[in-house]
């Protein structure tokens, strides 16, 4: 009596694998519900520091919430106003653009044939169907807008999450075995996540504005829409900037030919090269604590599970899993596997100074920036 039964490791591994498969299948099936909730969490993560700042300056909680929600709604209206009109016009003109691309495709095949490159015309049209690429762009935008159509549900969820901030510390004290350590760890994680979101948002905004200005200089239709697309897809690691360039390149090809499309492609390469390879690494440092391979694989996995929203939030979601694994002894090896090249080498040496952005995700940021602190006594 009372003796523990030691299960075979092979059985435990099989049971764990089966549980993971069931969980992933459930997430995939519940994607219409989970995606808006994750967007709400993302917006709340950006908004929480603003609300806490209001509350620390003696603004009553409900007034602070109203101000933050007003700011969120205003930004949403500005973005939807910039992209909405252009998107409607683009959707109406899409059949004409596809027809023009089919003509360009036929001309390209005839030109190749004149050079002695003889291809089966029907198969070649299937392989090099540029109009299908434009149709994919339109369907992807419509799918993303379908998720964002639950705007009321998203904003309501954000409001409830922000309302819970003031009671967070008390709940942790009642739940956790080591409340202070739990609050510190959550604070470090939240500070790292906020740092990523703020830096990525500013760089994405700079990328979108630059793209819109350059496309306007080239007289490309719907330059503002493609700037908004570049802003949004810059959050998608590795391939986001490539996908964002496709519609603008196709529009340049339709309107002005191959020469202008080449210049537009060069402009995208320069913009993304400067932002992605020079500015972003300097600002981010190694604060994400994720390897390059893990970032790409997470993009594929979360994109498959949750569609465009999963691709958009792949890095924050993977960071959350990594820190959860790192907090449990039995799963710490998974955190090591997800971590960057030098992160755990740093841990074996001297710990980075507090606030040093070059440290790892669990030690880089000072706790005050993240863990929800008890605000000043609230006025009702």
Image (cartoon, rainbow, N blue to C red):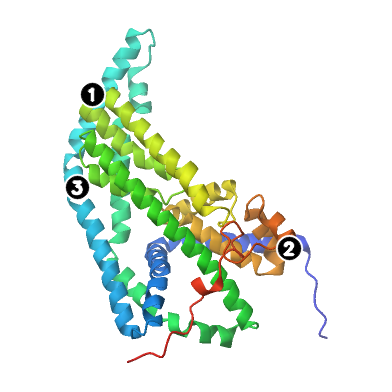
Lower sequence index among marks 3 and 1 = 3
- Spatial CA span between label 2 and label 1: 60 Å
| Disc 3, SS | helix
The image quarter in which residue 331 lies: bottom right
- Of badges 2 and 1, nearer the viewer stands 1
Where residue 92 appears, as percent x and y from the top left, is 16, 43
- Location of residue 337 in the rendering, given as x and y in whole percent from the top left corner: 66, 54
What is the x, y in percent for residue 128? 35, 26
Label 1: element kind: helix
Residue marked by disc 2: 11
* 225 and 137: which is toward the camera: 225
Residue count near mark 2 (Cα–Cα under 10 Å), binned few <14, some 14–19, many ≥20: few
Distance of mark 3 from mark 1, alpha carbons?
24 Å
Residue 174 is situated, as x and y percent measured from the top left of the image, at 57, 88
> Circles 3 and 1: CB distance less than 8 Å?
no
Q: What residue is shown with label 1?
A: 103
Mark 3, Cα crowd under 10 Å, few <14 / some 14-19 / many 20+, is: some
At 61% from the left edge and 59% from the top edge, which residue is drawn? 359
Identity of the residue drawn at 43% across and 64% down: 30
Looking at the figure, which quarter contains the N terminus? bottom right
Residue 340 visible somewhere in the drawing: yes
Examine the rendered structure and indicate whether residue 41 appears above or below residue 135. Answer: below
**Given contact means CB atoms under 8 Å apart, are the residues at marks 2 and 1 in contact?**
no
Sequence-wise, which precedes: disc 3 or disc 2?
2
Residue at 40%, 51% in the rendered image: 203
Q: Residue at x 40, y 66 (%)?
A: 46
Examine the image and state in which quarter residue 272 appears.
top left
For residue 86, the mark is 3
């Amino acid at each position: 009596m009372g003796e523990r039964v030691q299960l075979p490791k092979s059985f435990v591994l099989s049971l764990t694998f089966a549980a993971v498969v069931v969980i992933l299948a459930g997430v995939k099936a519940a994607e219409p519900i989970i995606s808006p909730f994750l967007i709400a969490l993302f917006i709340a993560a950006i908004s929480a520091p603003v609300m806490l700042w209001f509350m620390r300056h003696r603004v009553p909680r409900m007034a602070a919430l109203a101000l933050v929600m007003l700011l969120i709604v205003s930004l949403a209206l500005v973005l939807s106003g910039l992209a909405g009109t252009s998107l409607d016009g683009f959707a109406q003109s899409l059949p004409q653009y596809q027809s023009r691309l089919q003509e360009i495709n036929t001309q390209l095949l005839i030109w190749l044939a004149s050079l002695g490159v003889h291809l089966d015309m029907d198969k070649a049209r299937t392989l090099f169907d540029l109009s299908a690429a434009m149709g994919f762009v339109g369907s992807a935008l419509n799918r993303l807008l379908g998720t964002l159509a639950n705007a009321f549900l998203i904003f309501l969820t954000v409001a409830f999450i922000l309302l819970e901030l003031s009671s967070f510390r008390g709940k942790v004290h009642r739940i956790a075995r080591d409340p202070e350590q739990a609050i510190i760890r959550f604070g470090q994680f939240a500070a790292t996540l906020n740092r990523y979101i703020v830096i990525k948002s500013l760089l994405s905004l700079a990328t979108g504005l630059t793209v819109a200005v350059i496309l306007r200089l080239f007289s490309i239709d719907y330059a503002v829409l493609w700037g908004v697309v570049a802003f949004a897809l810059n959050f998608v690691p590795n391939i986001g900037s490539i996908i964002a360039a496709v519609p603008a390149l196709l529009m340049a090809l339709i309107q002005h030919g191959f020469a202008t499309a080449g210049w537009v492609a060069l402009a995208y390469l320069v913009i993304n090269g400067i932002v992605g390879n020079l500015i972003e690494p300097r600002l981010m440092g190694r604060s994400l604590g994720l390897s390059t391979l893990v970032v790409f694989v997470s993009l594929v996995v979360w994109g498959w599970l949750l569609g465009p929203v999963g691709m958009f939030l792949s890095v924050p979601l993977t960071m959350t899993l990594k820190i959860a694994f790192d907090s449990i002894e039995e799963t710490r090896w998974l955190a090591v596997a997800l971590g960057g090249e030098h992160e755990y080498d740093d841990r074996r040496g001297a710990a980075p100074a507090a606030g040093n952005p070059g440290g790892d995700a669990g030690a880089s940021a000072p706790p005050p920036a993240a863990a929800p602190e008890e605000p000043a006594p609230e006025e009702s």
